[in-house]
Image (cartoon, rainbow, N blue to C red):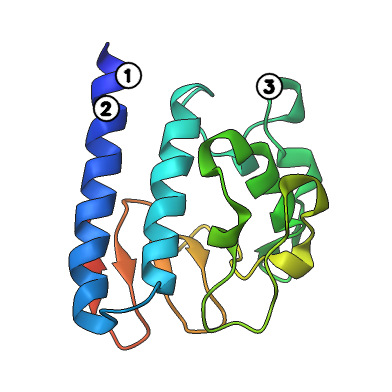
Amino acid sequence: MKNLIYLVAIVLTATVGCKKSDEQANPNGITCTRNLCQIYADMRNWEIDHHDKPPYLLSTNEGGVMELVTEKDGMRQNPHLIFQVMSNELVNPLLLVCPQDSKTAAKDWQHLTDANVSYVFPTHSMSNVIMQCPVDGTVMLDDGTVWEKSGRHSMKF
């Protein structure tokens, strides 16, 4: 029951917080901020069933992808694997492409590759950034805060 209450709180907070922010910036469309908010909520939901760790910090022996997303140049490699392992929570691979990116979303989870993902996962431990969009500069912090490149604080999860 506690997990269900936590899940409802996460989804409502992310949806309401993102919606208000996005309506001010782009009343007619999907934004990168909204995508990151939804991905964050889904990642937190995934973590509930996986020792409260994100997929990139959990061994493949425990259902994560840690050994498959090694670091190179400050980024986790194979980010599509991080999203693939969370596919039950994410539901739709359309979320993985920034609306401003020229990349095309995968038609389903089986065909997902890095070519269908806009978002990256930095590895630098001195930063609280867990995910970022190199297309528009939006970042997601580990506390659920989304910052846009313009410096606008979009949401505090």
Question: Could you tell which of marks 3 and 2 lies nearer the N-terminus?
Answer: 2
Label 3, secondary structure: give it.
Answer: helix
In front of the other: 36 or 94: 94
Asked which secondary structure carries label 2, the reply is helix
User: Residue 114: horizontal and vertical position, in percent?
Assistant: 76, 63
- Amino acid at the residue labelled 2: Tyr
Tell me the residue that label 3 is attached to: 62
Is residue 35 at all visible to an observer of this figure? yes
Local packing at callout 2 (Cα closer than 10 Å; few below 14, some 14-19, many 20+) is few
State which mark lies toward you, 3 or 1.
1
The three-letter code of the residue at mark 1 reads Asn
How many numbered markers are drawn? 3
Are the two marked residues, 2 and 1, in contact with CB atoms closer than 8 angstroms? yes
Residue at 37% x, 69% y: name it. 33
Closer-to-camera residue (29/135): 29
Residue drawn at 58 percent across, 60 percent down: 94
User: Can residue 157 be seen in this snapshot?
Assistant: no
First-in-chain label (3 vs 1)? 1
Which residue lies under the disc numbered 1?
3
Residue placed at 27% from the left, 11% from the top?
1
In the rendered view, does 79 fall on the left or right side of 149?
right
Q: Amino acid at mark 3?
A: Glu
> Foreground mark, 3 or 2?
2
Residue contact at pointers 3 and 1, CB within 8 angstroms: no
- In the rendered view, tell whether residue 119 sits above or below residue 71: below
Give x and y (percent) for residue 69.
Answer: 75, 50
Name above or below for residue 136 compared with residue 82. Answer: below
Q: Residues within 10 Å of mark 3 (few under 14, many from 20)?
A: few
Q: Which mark is residue 127?
A: none
Q: Which residue is mark 2?
A: 6
Q: Quadrant of residue 23?
A: bottom left
